């Protein structure tokens, strides 16, 4: 893909504003982190509903009727994962109890609407909504679990590498994941613009193997160097997390491109000039976070 200075300038300026908002949410405190990804969560659900209704017009009524309810169920999971991040032990227990009760009420609401409210869920609509929970809600639950400090990680008696990951839990690891994805996205675009020759996939014709490999290699190298020399962290830790984030993030980008292609649209939304919608901006995180979370679980085990 040839380098377009106008496109790059638009993307860069928008990205600076976006980065400022993201950093404020990521770094201020636990509440800002939770509120940031609450907005992202519901923004992704809204765009997912639009795309899936275009793909499955026959299921539009069921999807529209139950979309917000399933999104709220996912949000309750986010509260459960981050209750300890938002208050003391007593407040966390209260929030957890409220979230569990809300989940039960929402599930009952879906059942009532289906059986008695005249808003029956077809098998297609139910499948779309359940996939939405897995695709759009569970990754943010996992991210908030990581940000909360992940109490399931081993302490002083765990393996050395596991202790390194445990020490990075909280604020550091989400930043490493997000920085890896941002660097990979930018460096893949630049590398592909100048060196790209071989298309990566028919799903996203503008992506090339040269750009993809260059983005992964350069982002891993930069994150590892900054992590090791700037933060004094373990090289293996930053290298493995950045590699997983970059590779899984690229797959996440392709998955969202496939979804848009099936819906027949260029962007999932338009809230960011030059970058599209929520799904366009956070598609990589939706796969990178589960990959890193599972990796941390395996290390902890």
Image (cartoon, helix red, strand yellow):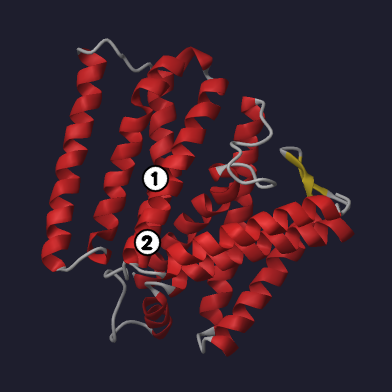
Drawn side of residue 76 relative to residue 7, left or right: left
Coordinates of residue 295 in the picture (x, y in percent): 45, 65
Residue located beneath label 1 in the image:
137
Residue at screen point 72% across, 71% down = 218
Quarter of the rendering occupied by the C terminus: bottom left
Q: Nearer the viewer, residue 9 or 280?
A: 9
Residue at screen point 15% across, 47% down = 98
SS for dot 1: helix
Coordinates of residue 29 in the picture (x, y in percent): 35, 69
Task: Please tell me how many numbered marks the rendered image carries.
Answer: 2
Coordinates of residue 194 in the picture (x, y in percent): 88, 60
Q: Residues within 10 Å of mark 1 (few under 14, many from 20)?
A: many
Quadrant housing residue 228: bottom right
Residue located beneath label 2 in the image:
32
SS for dot 2: helix
Drawn side of residue 41 relative to residue 277, left or right: left
Q: Nearer the viewer, mark 2 or mark 1?
A: 2
């Amino acid at each position: 893909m040839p380098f377009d200075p106008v496109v790059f300038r638009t993307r860069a300026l928008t990205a600076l504003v976006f980065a400022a908002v993201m950093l404020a949410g990521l770094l201020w405190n636990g509440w800002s982190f939770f509120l940031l990804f609450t907005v992202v969560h519901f923004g992704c659900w809204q765009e997912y509903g639009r795309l899936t209704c275009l793909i499955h017009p026959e299921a539009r009524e069921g999807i529209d009727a139950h979309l917000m309810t399933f999104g709220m169920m996912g949000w309750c999971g986010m509260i459960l994962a981050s209750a300890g991040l938002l208050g003391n032990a007593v407040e966390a227990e209260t929030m957890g109890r409220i979230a569990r009760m809300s989940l039960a009420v929402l599930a009952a609401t879906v059942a009532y609407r289906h059986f008695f409210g005249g808003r029956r869920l077809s098998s297609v609509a139910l499948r779309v909504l359940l996939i939405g929970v897995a695709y759009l809600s569970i990754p943010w639950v996992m991210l908030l679990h990581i940000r909360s400090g992940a109490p399931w990680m081993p302490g002083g008696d765990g393996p050395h590498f596991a202790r390194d990951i445990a020490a990075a839990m909280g604020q550091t690891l989400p930043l490493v994941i997000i920085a890896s994805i941002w660097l990979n996205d930018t460096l893949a675009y630049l590398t592909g613009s100048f060196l790209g020759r071989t298309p990566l996939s028919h799903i996203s014709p503008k992506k090339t193997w040269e750009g993809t490999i260059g983005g992964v290699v350069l982002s891993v190298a930069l994150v590892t160097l900054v992590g090791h020399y700037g933060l004094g962290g373990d090289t293996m830790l930053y290298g493995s997390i950045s590699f997983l984030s970059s590779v899984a993030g690229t797959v996440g980008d392709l998955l969202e491109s496939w979804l848009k292609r099936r819906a027949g649209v260029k962007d999932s939304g338009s809230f960011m000039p030059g970058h599209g919608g929520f799904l366009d901006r956070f598609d990589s995180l939706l796969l990178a976070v589960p990959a890193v979370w599972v990796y941390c679980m395996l290390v902890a085990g």
